[in-house]
Amino acid sequence: MNFSFIIPVYNRPDEIEELLHSLAKQNYDHDFEIVIVEDGSSIPCEEVINTFRDKLNISYFFKENSGPGDSRNFGMKNAKGDYFLILDSDCILPSNYLSEAEKALTENFADCFGGPDNALDSFTDIQKAINFAMTSLLTTGGIRGGSEKIDKFQPRSFNMGLSKKAFEASNGFGNIHPGEDPDLSIRLWKMNFETKLFSKVFVYHKRRIDWSKFYKQVNKFGKARPILNSWYPEYNKLTYFFPSAFLVGFLFSILFFIFGIELFLILYGIYFIAILISSTIKNRSFSIGILSVFAVAMQFYGYGIGFIKSYFNIILLKKKPQSAFPELFF
């Protein structure tokens, strides 16, 4: 296989430098290509890229801002490989990333795969707490963390593989963001392409976000899901409703507590204590455990509110997604 990395970037030259450092350290014996698409940045990364041209095979393109999905499509159209490895610019790769990807594809080929994400010791406490919230078995079911107990995996575009054949058949990503990656997965399923999780093909996802950005991100995730459910009702799942049910249930548990029924609020307390203990053990830090409780609470609240608002507008009121939530479309 001839691999081409596809990396959209927007005002993040520092991220690209870290990512390219990790790409230069790959223990891979074959040539590979890196396609970087600058998505209308006001802080371009070309000078950083030029410092790696003697170490890596890099193609650099600058285009007007049109969103990450369209930028990935642009990169794949201009790539020379027959298998595309799609990354976010805030990722750092372990040295065996490419060798593990080739091994997994050789043993169990898939036209589209996704890999999990981990945190490095050098990450900040908030980054580690958010990573826990996004990958833990207690929150997302461990899907982003590498769990393989899932029938149809929807790869996420921060760490995704896509064959040239599947790209050409599907035309790549749509113009919704976030949500462009599950949208692509479902369209691939409908064309009889398989998607798989390769648990050993992981990245270190250095999410450069603060609490307000994290809330905005998960809130958009919540808004996007009912839109996808309206487009593909046959792939709707009860688990998609869980964060909203969790949020509503918490509000009712407070109401019950006021009237002297303590059980439901105690159950919520037990859950968050489990989050605290699990994160503390995993990260070997009580302070990160505390931050993880906050991150998980924000995750459920932000996603739940976004999902409820979107469900009301898209499913019940039948509004057009582009009119109801223009911030999700490019």
Image (spheres, rainbow, N blue to C red):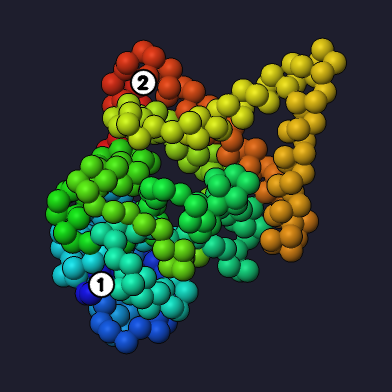
The numbered disc on residue 178 is none
Residue 233 as seen in the image, left or right of residue 261: left
Identify the amino acid type marked 1. Phe
Q: Residue at x 16, y 70 (%)?
A: 80
How many dots with numbers? Answer: 2
Residue 239 position (above or below residue 152): above
Question: 269 and 179: which one is in front?
Answer: 269
Residues packed near mark 2 inside 10 Å, few (<14), some (14 to 19) or many (20 plus): many
Residue 76 position in % (x across, y down): 20, 60
Q: Residue at x 40, y 84 (%)?
A: 27
Residue for badge 2:
314
Residue 322 position in % (x across, y down): 28, 27
Residue for badge 1:
3
Residue 286 position (above or below residue 271): below
Question: 81 and 42: which one is in front?
Answer: 81
Task: Specify the quadrant that holds the C terminus.
Answer: top left
Question: 204 and 214: which one is in front?
Answer: 204
Task: Specify the quadrant that holds the N terminus.
Answer: bottom left
Q: Residue at x 40, y 81 (%)?
A: 26
Question: 165 and 208: which one is in front?
Answer: 165
Residue 154 position in % (x across, y down): 38, 48
Asked whether the viewer can see residue 37, the reply is no
Residue 97 position (above or below residue 268): below
Residue 328 position in % (x across, y down): 35, 34
Residue 248 as seen in the image, left or right of residue 100: right
Looking at marks 2 and 1 on the same chain, the residue that comes earlier in the sequence is marked by 1
Which element type, helix, strand or loop, lies under badge 2? helix
Identify the amino acid type marked 2. Ile
Asked whether the viewer can see residue 52, the reply is yes
Which element type, helix, strand or loop, lies under badge 1? strand
Residue 25, quarter of the rendered image: bottom left
